[in-house]
Image (spheres, rainbow, N blue to C red):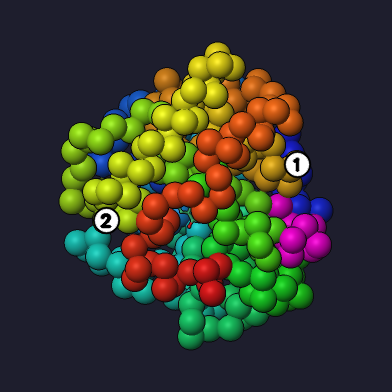
């Protein structure tokens, strides 16, 4: 497995991480046994970075990962690094209730995550969205205290803009920023990526397939449950969806010429952006995992990159990456 550094102060991690969210939430029903088999297969293939959030299925995702780690061979379990997001508040019906980044809450969230994961430390810990009522210095400072006590190894960030990145990094060492990055989500290239590069912070990129939209497998007639993220995501609606799937067909022509899949081209493009970029793959079956890992063997030369950018120019997607209410919570979009 190829590896990449997680910032200048973090560990080497597998060049692709496994994002486990879809195994518990947001993309319709997942099969528990297949989810665990997928985590085991990823570890077997040399994936070291497992990404989760305590609010993915209200603890479900962490308990799932905990079960997968317990049932994995010791050597595989020991290579696994957990990357955990916290802060999002939920209710018993699954409703979202804002964000809590107060220092006391940070410690409380961490205590529960350690139990659910069944580990004695979290490798990278980050607030999912900043709490507008709590300065980032206080939230990051609370994680730094957990680092001092050995409960957390490294500090990460999620969906924040350049100013917040600077303030956080001035408080304590930050290893990575988790943010959406794909052929059709390139907003970070303006000011965020130059800032992380200046400060020696890596990017763990999510939504590399734009939540399946540019995977080559998504079809116009797909039926979504009401609680599926995509049923209210602007890019998956009506004419926007038609336009975006036309972009995918342009990409498919390039993939076919190279003898690879659309998903592999899309993941390989993100991998090609730099050694400081680690794509998180949202596979929840072994079949999708195998396809994703195949992207590591795809080499894109200058002609390939030019053809890909011509097929899917920056800003060519129709629709925002989140619905308006969620966009408003993104420090990275200010
Ligand atoms: N920090 C944040 O704000 C944030 C936000 C969202 C996600 N994340 C993290 O990033 C991870 C990845 O995000 P994501 O799940 O949205 O990423 P993604 O890879 O863009 O989307 C995953 C979706 O793509 C589909 N897909 C089709 N072909 C695939 C293939 N070959 N490999 C993988 N998936 C394929 C999957 O569908 P089927 O399973 O139906 O086939 C799934 O619905 C999450 O698991 C989570 O840990 C972080």
Which of the pair 320/65 is nearer the observer? 320
* As drawn, 291 above or below 11: above
Which of the pair 107/39 is nearer the observer? 39
Q: Position of residue 317 (x, y in %)?
A: 44, 49
| Label 2 CA crowd tier, 10 Å (few <14, some 14–19, many 20+) | some
For the record, the magenta segment spans: 194-202
Label 1 close to label 2 by CB (< 8 Å): no
| Label 1 CA crowd tier, 10 Å (few <14, some 14–19, many 20+) | some
Residue drawn at x 54%, y 24% as measured from the top left: 254
Camera sees residue 277 = yes
Q: Is residue 12 left or right of residue 146?
A: right
Disc 2 on helix, strand or loop?
helix
Q: Position of residue 155 (x, y in %)?
A: 66, 61
Q: Position of residue 51 (x, y in %)?
A: 52, 46
As drawn, the label of residue 232 is: 2
As drawn, the label of residue 275 is: 1
Residue drawn at x 57%, y 59% as measured from the top left: 187
Q: Quadrant of residue 158?
A: bottom right
Residue drawn at x 25%, y 65% as measured from the top left: 95
Query: Nearer the viewer's eye, disc 1 or disc 2?
Result: 2
Q: Position of residue 2 (x, y in %)?
A: 72, 28
Which of the pair 164/59 is nearer the observer? 164
* As drawn, 148 above or below 44: below
- Under 8 Å from ligand 1: the CB of mark 1? no
- Under 8 Å from ligand 1: the CB of mark 2? no
The kind of secondary structure the magenta stretch mainly shows is: helix
* Location of ligand 1 given as a quarter of the image: top left
* As drawn, 27 above or below 315: above
């Amino acid at each position: 497995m190829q590896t990449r550094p997680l910032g200048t102060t973090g560990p080497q991690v597998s060049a692709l991480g496994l994002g486990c969210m879809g195994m518990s939430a947001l993309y319709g029903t997942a099969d528990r046994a297949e989810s665990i088999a997928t985590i085991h297969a990823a570890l077997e293939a040399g994936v070291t970075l497992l990404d989760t959030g305590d609010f993915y299925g209200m603890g479900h995702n962490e308990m799932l990962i905990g079960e997968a780690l317990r049932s994995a061979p010791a050597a595989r379990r020991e290579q696994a690094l957990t990357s955990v997001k916290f802060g999002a508040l939920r209710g018993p019906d699954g409703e979202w209730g804002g964000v809590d980044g107060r220092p006391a809450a940070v410690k409380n969230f961490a205590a529960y995550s350690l139990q659910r994961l069944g580990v004695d430390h979290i490798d990278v810990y980050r607030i999912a969205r900043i709490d507008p009522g709590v300065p980032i210095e206080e939230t990051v400072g609370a994680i730094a205290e957990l680092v001092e006590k050995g409960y957390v190894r490294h500090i990460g960030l999620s969906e924040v803009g350049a100013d917040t990145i600077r303030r956080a990094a001035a408080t304590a060492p930050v290893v990575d920023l988790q943010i959406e990055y794909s052929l059709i989500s390139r907003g970070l290239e303006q000011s965020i990526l130059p800032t992380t590069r200046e400060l020696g912070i890596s990017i763990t990129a999510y939504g590399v397939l734009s939540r399946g939209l540019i995977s080559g497998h998504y079809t116009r007639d797909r039926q979504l449950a009401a609680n599926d993220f995509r049923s209210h995501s602007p890019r998956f609606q009506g004419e926007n969806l038609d336009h975006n799937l036309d972009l995918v067909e342009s990409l498919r022509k390039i993939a076919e010429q190279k003898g690879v899949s659309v998903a592999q081209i899309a993941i390989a493009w993100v991998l090609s952006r730099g050694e400081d970029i680690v794509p998180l793959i949202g596979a929840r079956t072994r079949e999708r995992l195998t396809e994703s890992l195949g992207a590591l063997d795809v080499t894109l030369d200058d002609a390939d990159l030019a053809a890909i950018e011509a097929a899917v120019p920056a800003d060519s997607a129709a629709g925002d990456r989140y619905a308006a209410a969620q966009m408003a919570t993104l420090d990275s979009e200010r």
